């Protein structure tokens, strides 16, 4: 097997162990000799794998002391951060910060969309809200999540700003995973359904400020629901 692929395999395994909580922030990774034995690779391969994680901000190498796992806020790799958000063990920080990011971007997207949204896009959003209502009544979490994500996707594209949709594309997997987690709770479904209806009304009015406030209200409710029903903080 090519050495570069071995480096990737070792760094990926170490990242998985960090994300799973085996190596929490502030802890040290095993030494080169131990990692070499665990992965049955050369010390050079291990060294390059650790340097890969260092370049992503996941770990820091303190010469003479060891390799330490950084707090999530210091990570610089989108892929690594998204993995922590999607697969991390009770990673409250990632969950909260994801909603903070959504609040910043989606409130602005809704404001732009109010000026640019088409009748066809509004009709599509109404269909998604209707589907959410039917799924809520049937407690069909999968369908509810699908309609929820589709509703927000219309707004992102209706904003007319190509960078907004591009920024959200890498988040699609983690957003789906988070929605599936939170939407299992019936009260969260009910809250989301109410907020989505208000966002649709605001966009239909063509008032940018009303649309921004409606989306901001939804994000605030989402944060409150996450802390109350999921994180219990």
Image: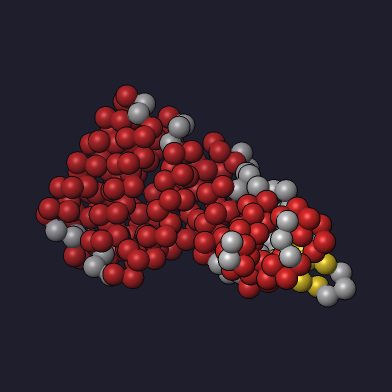
The residue at the far right in this view is 64
Coordinates of residue 221 in the picture (x, y in percent): 45, 46
Q: Nearer the viewer, residue 198 or 9?
A: 9
Q: Quadrant of residue 107?
A: bottom left
Q: Is residue 232 above or below residue 94?
A: above
The quadrant of the rendering that contains the N terminus is bottom right
Residue positioned most to the left: 119
- The spot of residue 23 in percent (x, y) is 74, 53
Left or right of 7? Residue 201 is left
Please say whether residue 127 is visible from this viewpoint.
yes
Residue 187 x, y percent position in the rendering: 44, 32
- Identify the residue shown where x is 50% and y is 41%: 225
Q: Nearer the viewer, residue 6 or 132?
A: 6
The answer to whether 112 appears left or right of 189 in the picture is: left
Q: Is residue 74 visible?
A: no
Q: Where does the image place residue 173, in percent across and percent down from the top left? A: 43, 51
The C terminus - image quarter: top right
Up the image or down, 86 lies above or below 103; here it is: above
Classify residue 6 as left or right of residue 201: right
The picture quadrant where one finds residue 105 is bottom left
Residue drawn 32% across the image and 35% down it: 143
Residue plotted at (81% across, 73% down)? 62
Rendered residue at 25%/36% (across/down):
131
Task: Give the mark count.
Answer: 0
Viewer-side residue, 135 vs 171: 171
Which residue occupies the extreme top position in the image? 138
């Amino acid at each position: 097997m090519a050495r570069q692929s071995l480096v990737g395999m070792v760094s990926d395994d170490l990242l998985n162990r960090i994300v799973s909580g085996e190596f929490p922030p502030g802890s040290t990774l095993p030494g080169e000799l131990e990692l070499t034995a665990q992965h049955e690779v050369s010390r050079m391969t291990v060294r390059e794998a650790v340097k890969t994680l260092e370049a992503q901000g996941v770990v820091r190498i303190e010469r003479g002391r060891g390799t330490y796992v950084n707090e999530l806020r210091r990570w610089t790799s989108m892929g690594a951060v998204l993995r922590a958000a999607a697969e991390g063990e009770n990673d409250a920080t990632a969950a909260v910060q994801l909603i903070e990011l959504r609040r910043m971007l989606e409130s602005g997207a809704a404001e732009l969309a109010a000026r640019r949204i088409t009748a066809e896009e509004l009709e599509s959003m109404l269909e998604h809200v209707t589907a959410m209502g039917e799924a809520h009544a049937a407690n069909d979490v999968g369908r509810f999540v699908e309609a929820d994500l589709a509703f927000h996707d219309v707004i992102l594209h209706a904003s007319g700003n190509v960078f907004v949709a591009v920024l959200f594309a890498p988040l699609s997997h983690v957003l789906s995973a988070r929605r599936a987690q939170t939407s299992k709770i019936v009260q969260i479904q009910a809250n989301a359904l109410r907020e989505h209806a208000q966002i649709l009304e605001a966009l239909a009015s063509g008032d940018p400020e009303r649309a921004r406030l409606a989306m901001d209200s939804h994000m605030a409710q989402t944060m409150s629901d996450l802390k109350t029903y999921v994180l219990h903080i």
